[in-house]
Amino acid sequence: MQGKRPVAIDLFAGCGGVTVGLRQAGFRVAAALEIESLASRTYRMNHRGVRLTMADIRDVDGRKWLRELGLRRGQLGLLAGCPPCQGFSTLRTRNGATWNRDPRNNLVAEMLRLVKEMRPKTVMMENVPRLAEKKVFRDFTDTLECLGYKVKWDIVDVKDYAVPQRRRRLVLVAGRGIDVRFPKPVKSHRTVREAIGHLPPAGKSGDPLHDLPEQRSEAVRRKIAKIPRNGGSRRDLPKHMQLECHLRCNGFKDIYGRMAWDEVSPTITGGCFNPSKGRFLHPARNRNITMREAALLQTFPSRYKFDLAAGKQGVALMIGNALPPELVRRQAVEVKRALACAQRVTRRNGGGRKPKQGP
């Protein structure tokens, strides 16, 4: 029995960002799938009531999974998934100049296979914008439509959905005979100040994630101290303090840059623990943002736990790879609303005909 709350499954669950958003929107996340051990341990620390399977999606039988959850084919409310996007990254392909044969590119097709086997009422998928150019994405949308799903997709910036961060993502929603809307953009953006300005000083806060120590050379510390507060960058340094390669290069301008208090942050990536990876310096303090600050800029709850076994770099990778929970929550609210509307129509029609399951 599904109960009053619609049931969801979270594929490629990572450390749990999608599950956070789904649960905040009122879904019961019955199960999740994740292959990485560090992310799986973090997921279990925060979502003990969810049945997490640590396995490769290619080894998962959708029909068997449903039976184990006590669900019939076509009964699942939502199948959500964020297939690993590194295979479609423009950075990994020299800004699109080379062909990427990353085997993770096939995982979109594996998600489609589970849709065929499980026939969820709705589907939600997120990825990098570049996926829209790929044949595997066209196959995904075409097949969904052939199965009777109404498909919508768009490329959005998460800052327009109350996430204090610039981050462009492709978002797809599909309903089996159900029209699912996108959430409305916010009228004003949340800022870095709103997200992290309330935190106590790092180092002695009592929060392990906020207190992870920094290890920088004295030369790097001097460089950070010279960068102007509230939005300065390496280009503001005197030439003798800039690296020779930086002087010759006109790109990567955010390296050793500070965030600005009253703007959104740059994209929080897996390199957010290191100022040499982007604009990850605190707006006012002479340090990198802490991992708690990174998590808050991704809209994780303030007490969300992370496994620290792999240190700061491991935590940063989990946070950077996550889909911001607030974006998920807002989209999931629309999915839930569409499911409720479809259920009311079915009741008015006396139950109606049983939906066609397809081949």
Image (cartoon, rainbow, N blue to C red):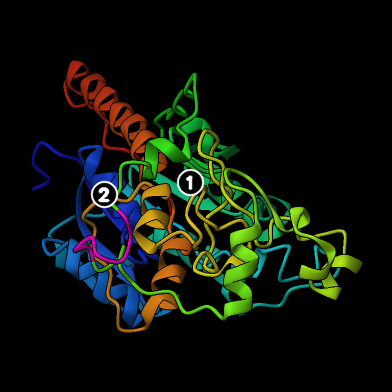
Q: Which residue is mark 1?
A: 147
Residue appearing at x 33%, y 42% in the figure:
121
Magenta span contains residue 191: no
At numbered mark 2, what does the secondary structure look like: helix, strand or loop? Answer: loop
At numbered mark 1, what does the secondary structure look like: helix, strand or loop? Answer: loop
Tell me where residue 129 appears, x and y as whole percent: 65, 50
* Kind of residue at badge 1: Leu
Q: Give me the C-alpha separation between circle 2 and circle 1.
A: 37 Å
Residue closer to the observer: 154 or 340: 154
Residue closer to the observer: 167 or 192: 192
Closer mark to the observer between disc 2 and disc 1: 2
Residue 353 in which image quadrant: top left
| Residue extent of the magenta highlight | 201-207
Q: Residue furthest right?
A: 248
Q: Is residue 306 left or right of residue 123?
A: left
The dot on residue 301 is 2
